[in-house]
Amino acid sequence: MRVLLAGGGTAGHTSPLLATADAIRRLAPDLGIEPEITCLGTPRGLENRVVPEAGYPLELIPPVPLPRRPNADLVKVPARLRAAVKETLAVLDRVRPDVVVGYGGYVSMPAYLAARRRKLPLVLHEQNAVPGLANKAGARVAQRVAVSFPDTPLPRAEYVGLPIRPMISGLDRARLRAEARSFFGLDADRPTLLVTGGSQGARRLNQSVSGAAGALASAGVQVLHVVGPQGEASPDAGADSDVPYVVVNFVNRMDLAYAAADLVVSRAGASSVTEAAAVGLPAVFVPLPIGNGEQEHNARPVVDAGGGLLVADADLTTEWVLGTIPHLANDADKLASMGAAAAALIPRDADERLARIVFEAARR
């Protein structure tokens, strides 16, 4: 069975793509299937690094950005799309997939059109609670439409959850806590706050939390702060205390970051929401204030279930952090109830659910 997985640009697309690819490989032998998996991306996305590192071949086509609003780029879309579809058809003719799987983003629209032209089965996965333009169009022609969040407005949507890596979905935070805190140079027994703005960091989170370092230290709360590749944080004078405030640019072992933490402050991308909830980590979600509002919708089911708090980007000030985080991070009973509420909501086996849908589509 040959599978083409189309998605790229950011971790939001590449992470579920790779989780699905790994699940297909893992499940295929029990079904008597020998899978051949190829990924489709663009030359400027994260997939150029992470896909080869994961051991999958990568084909590249030109990106086709779809403007959210009318602008000068809009008139260029038809020509760009035709060129990208032509190159995608060439990829399909070389790879000869039995099924095409799309994850949205710049690479997916050409893949959807090319798959339809070659009459190939198409499976679509939407990461966010509010679908992007490519997946809104692709859902009209896809044989199966899988979504990460309940009530996602796409036709024939099947709620499977967001595919995440087994190192996260199978994480036992309590068992790894001591190892994780040692790994990051944190104290073994202090309440621990994790701060992360996703793969690119978040300036608002970096400034607001680091500005409260003194109060956090006074409350005995240590911090693991992932600022992003280009980000920075300047903890105030409290960072001079004996309570650790660890600043790193990037973390390869997010399983250990989650295991070390009692509470996380993060953006509300689909992966951030799903991973925190799946491992039972209470969260303060700060949706990105741009886009089509999908991040607030991503976080809403977890927040409504009692598994997290929702704070607007403009409201996440140092004063808000001072007034909320020290008390919450020291309330073990509250954190335990929040974590249990979040963990009960999120499927941990979405990667295998989506892989089975891919098998079914290929057989048909």
Image (cartoon, rainbow, N blue to C red):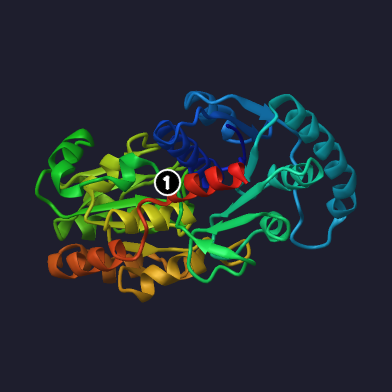
| Front-most of residues 112 and 143 | 143
Q: Residue at x 45, y 57 (%)?
A: 161
Q: Is residue 251 above or below residue 309?
A: above
Residue 128: % across, % down:
54, 59
Q: Secondary structure at mark 1?
A: helix
* Residue 211 visible, this orientation: no
Amino acid under disc 1? Glu
291 up-or-down from 29: above or below: below
Residue drawn at (29%, 65%) of the image: 344
Q: Position of residue 270 (x, y in %)?
A: 48, 56
Relative to 107, 178 lies left or right: left
In the current view of this chain or complex, which residue is farthest to the left? 189
Q: Considering only vertical position in the picture, is 229 above or below 224?
A: above
At 26% from the left and 40% from the top, the residue drawn is: 256
Whole-percent x and y of residue 200?
50, 44
- Can the viewer see residue 218? yes
Residue at the spot x=14%, y=44% of the render? 175
Residue closer to the observer: 274 or 91: 91
Report x, y in % for residue 290. 60, 62
In-image side of 335 versus 25 (left or right): left
Query: Eyeballing the image, is 281 above or below 45?
Result: below
Q: Residues within 10 Å of mark 1 (few under 14, many from 20)?
A: many
Q: Quadrant of residue 89?
A: top right
Quadrant where the image shows the N terminus: top right
Q: Which residue is mark 1?
A: 352
Question: Is 287 situated left or right of 291 in this image?
Answer: left
